[in-house]
Amino acid sequence: MRMQLLLVFALSLPLAGCGQIPLSSDKGDPAQATDAPKDDEALSSQSAGTGQAGSEEAGSEDEADEASTAYPKKDDEAEPDEPVAAGTDADVAAAAAPASADMLSVQELSRAQELALGSGELKTLAASSVDRDSLADQAASGDMEALSTLKDRPSYRLLYTQRLPTEKGAEASRAAEVAVFRYDTNTLERSKVDLASGKVEALSDATGQWAPLVPEEISEAAAVARADAKVQEALKAAGLNPADAKANGILTVSQEDGAICAAKRCVRLFFASARLPLPTFNVVVNLSDLELVEVVDMPGFAAAQP
């Protein structure tokens, strides 16, 4: 009976190469065979679940290393007694302190603007001119009566405030660049504000430097355009409602001597909608004086008409 069991056990072993793994002539456990190949010992030790002797040899150190490599521990299976590095007070303070590349906070932006507009020539400008941002809501609603006051007084707008990088080799500091556009002189005034000391100094002359267009200027220009009879007629012909037609715009500069947009800040408007996304005409508005310059068909539009 014992021999029959051994025969069944031998037939159940896996095949190695092109022949069956040889068994020892001893009647004991195959794992105890001294002249069996090393690979046979590893395979035989895997049968330790049968309860026979030799199961202790199956847990050798080499096999344990291989098992740990093949099946690495998951994060949640880490040893509970492993020490966890704790940050020092200095590490916590360093993480909380703003890095040199941090953007300005809302409070820093507001403080930089107040300091810039409260010093030097900008202080005089702010006291004697109209801040166009104070009329932004009226412009958006098309209140031309409110905007008409801008024609009689000089005006300005704070275009942007941004982080000013520290110059190479200089001590790290947090400073802001505040840019204000003057519509009466068509110039961009840029100031450097040291947020630590509150010191304000004018940056290099920005005459001729491009000043970015802001959404409030598009709202002003669109209000001027929609109030013109010629633009209203063009909007109706394009299937748009003159009262609330949406516009987008880009800055436009003329290279012709004596042209309005060679000396004034102008924006070119394009009216469209989701139903009619391609504009059929464009409008040029003089932002300095809030006056319509021209209404022209889009290039190639007239020729494409039947």
Image: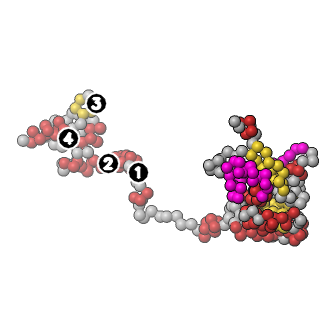
| Residue labelled with disc 1 | 72
Q: In the image, 117: left or right of 80?
A: right
For the residue pair 279 and 62, the one nearer the viewer reads as 279
| Residue labelled with disc 3 | 17
Sooner in the amino-acid sequence: mark 3 or mark 4: 3
Sooner in the amino-acid sequence: mark 3 or mark 2: 3
| Residue labelled with disc 4 | 30
Task: Spot the residue most to the left.
Answer: 1
| Residue labelled with disc 2 | 60
Magenta residues, start to end: 227-256
- Label 1 near label 4: C-beta < 8 Å? no
Which residue: 47% across, 64% down? 83
* Residue type (three-letter) at the residue carrying disc 3: Gly
Q: Which mark lies nearer to you, 3 or 2?
A: 3
Which residue: 9% across, 42% down? 2
Which residue: 40% across, 58% down? 77
Image coords of residue 113 (percent x, y): 78, 67
Q: Is residue 159 magenta?
A: no
